[in-house]
Amino acid sequence: MLTRRAALALSLAALAAPALAESPKIPVVASFSIIGDFLREVGGDRVSVTTIVGPDGDAHVYQPSPADGRRIAQAKVIFVNGLGFEGWLERLISVAKTKGTVVTLGKGVAARKDEEGADPHAWQDVANAKIYVNEIRDALVAADPEGAESYRANAAAYLAKLDALDAEIVKTLDAIPTDRRRVVSTHDAFGYFSARYGVEFIAPQGVSTESEASARDIARIIDAVKQHKVGAVFLENVADPRLAKRIAAETGARVGGMLYSDALSDAKGDGANYIDMMRHNVRELAKALTP
Ligand code: ZN
């Protein structure tokens, strides 16, 4: 008969041992919350996802911590947006000396560029989100060939949802007269959205939040708002609300609620995943612009 102590040791060992069927998850890192959501969709339960810039975080000006370096060092694959979005990331990756593969998404995206540089906010067009998802699927298949079937099935199911989302956005915004589809945002994060869905955005701040809007930038927007009909001035989840409120106050334009530009909301918010985030934005736009 077992002694009490031996029985306890046995039961503890049983608790600590992993279940037979369970293989260790592939550690992957996403630079920011939207890529993290795509990774969870495609990776399912085969991957363990760590996101560096979390909900409502501004990836343009993020300051990485030593813990971020450790996460990158331990990752098998690191997924980044590129196009100058995460300016701090290259150094973090080189300091972390990771053996993981760095995958820059959006290689297949037609990048919007002007004299300021590239516009990194490609995810604001659902067609580009689909490109990210395809690239994530291919990178996960390469990193974990045993999971290929699962990654392909997950991606196919999610891509179908993205097609439905895209059609829903087009339908909602097409119902708004073209001459009413003009709004103000804080930073220039909606260029891809604008090109795809036909809503004009003007913004005092450029495609990055790194440099603040100058007095001249703000004056230019105030003039534009006074000259053209503008449906509303929108706040952004990653931006200081004061600038948008000031423009609204000085022009008499309406404050039109908050848009998710560069990050998801936390789990309790209504933009906790990419599809909900896009739906929220379109709902807010339609509310402000519908005659
Ligand atoms: Zn941005």
Image (spheres, rainbow, N blue to C red):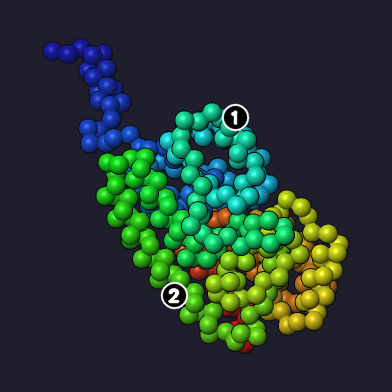
- Label 1 SS: helix
Image disc number at residue 281: none
> How far, Cα to Cα, is label 1 from label 2?
43 Å
| Label 1 crowd bin: few (<14), some (14–19), many (20+), radius 10 Å | some
Mark 1 residue's CB less than 8 Å from ligand 1: no
Kindly identify which residue carries mark 1: 95
Q: Which amino acid does label 2 sit on?
A: Ala
Which of the two discs, 1 and 2, labels the residue nearer the N terminus?
1
Image position, residue 137 (x, y; %):
38, 51
- Residue nearer the viewer, 206 or 270: 206
Left or right of 6? Residue 30 is: right
Left or right of 205? Residue 138 is: left
Q: Which residue is drawn at 67% across and 71% down?
A: 201
Task: Tell me the quarter of the picture where residue 11 sits.
Answer: top left
- Residue nearer the viewer, 109 or 221: 109
* Circle 1 or circle 2, nearest the eye: 1
Could you tell me if residue 161 is visible in this image? yes
Kindly identify which residue carries mark 2: 167
Q: Quadrant of the C terminus?
A: bottom right
- Label 2 SS: helix
Q: Which residue is drawn at 58% across and 66% down?
A: 192
Q: Which residue is drawn at 69% across and 62% down?
A: 114
Mark 2 residue's CB less than 8 Å from ligand 1: no
Q: Which amino acid does label 1 sit on?
A: Val
Image position, residue 60 (x, y; %):
66, 49
Image position, residue 87 (x, y; %):
65, 44
